[in-house]
Amino acid sequence: MTMLLEAVRRHADAHADPLGFAPTPIPGLFAVRATAPSGLLHDVYRPLVCLLVQGSKQVTMGTQAFAFAAGDSLLVTADVPTVSQITRASLAAPYYSLVLELDLALIAELTAEMKPALVSDTAPVRVDTTDGEVADAALRLLRLLDRPHALPVLQAQLRREMHYWLLAGRHGPAIRRLGWPDSHARRIARAVAVLRETFAEPVTVERLAAAAGMSPSSFHHHFKAITSLSPLQFQEQLRLIEAKRLMLSEGISAAHAAFSVGYESVPQFTREYARLFGLPPVRDTHVARESARAA
């Protein structure tokens, strides 16, 4: 993990944006850096694995809280709304993590080739110790960034290897169900893709259920079981998170943000925003900007 920390540190220190995200040219792979504990961060994660190499973080999904630190991995196997907070970070010892968004097609391919295994873990979020083989594959993937000539030739092979070791390791049982084309997780993922693409538009449960290949009643049950929210609540969170991003990154007004993400009533938007983020939009964005300047 020491060598992986150094590789993540080098890339993140050189490429992190003001929010601490350091993308890479490798699809789905990026590093995260923070020099101070964060406030509460709301997001709707895609399936991913986060290798924490320095500092600590807490992620809450529904009523469940997951704390993890250096040497641990957070696994998310469904599109789920979360509240996260970096709990240990400083200028002297920043928070660093490496995130890989899971490739469902690659998981399906590898699952078909690997020996069948019992899949008993259906929790969409879990934390466990990072497997040595996963950390080693991640390190070699990061080292490719220093060899631009080798990147286009070897990156697909190393991404495949990292997914293999994730499937073969501690997180494997939870990841395997993503490789089943007809699993409830994959069906709900198809409906979530529709919501992500059309969150600013009215979307019926019937349309989402059809995308998932389920009856409306069965779809509603499985959607809530996997994401912890109803489809309408999920769409609301997507809208509010995007509205906050628009206000912070593009400086638009709360009213403009509300209409941009599909709200027809600014007072309704303000109420729902305050319920999710704890403050009304104008005050929340002011506090966020002040905190960013102080950091």
Image (cartoon, rainbow, N blue to C red):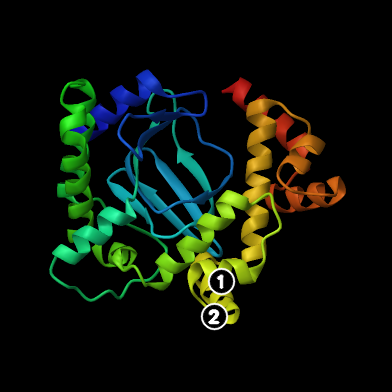
**What whole-number distance in Å separates the C-alpha atoms at marks 1 and 2?**
8 Å
Above or below — where is 80 with respect to 222? above
Number of numbered discs:
2
- When asked about the image quadrant of residue 141, the answer is top left
Q: Nearer the viewer, mark 1 or mark 2?
A: 1
Number of other residues with Cα within 10 Å of mark 2, as a class: few under 14, some 14 to 19, many 20 or more: few
For numbered disc 2, what is the local secondary structure?
A: helix
Above or below — where is 224 with respect to 79? below
Q: Residue at x 16, y 42 (%)?
A: 157
What residue would you read off at disc 1?
A: 209
Residue 177 lies, in percent from the top left, at 32, 68
The earlier-in-sequence mark between 1 and 2 is 1
Depth order, front residue of 249/264: 264
Above or below — where is 245 with respect to 289? below
Left or right placement of residue 82 versus residue 70 in this view: right
- Can the viewer see residue 128? no
Residue 282 lies, in percent from the top left, at 78, 35
Q: Residue at x 33, y 71 (%)?
A: 121
Depth order, front residue of 14/249: 249
- Can the viewer see residue 127? yes
Depth order, front residue of 222/138: 222
For numbered disc 1, what is the local secondary structure?
A: helix
What residue would you read off at disc 2?
A: 218
Q: Amino acid at mark 2?
A: Ser
Q: Quadrant of the N terminus?
A: top left
Residue 33 lies, in percent from the top left, at 41, 30
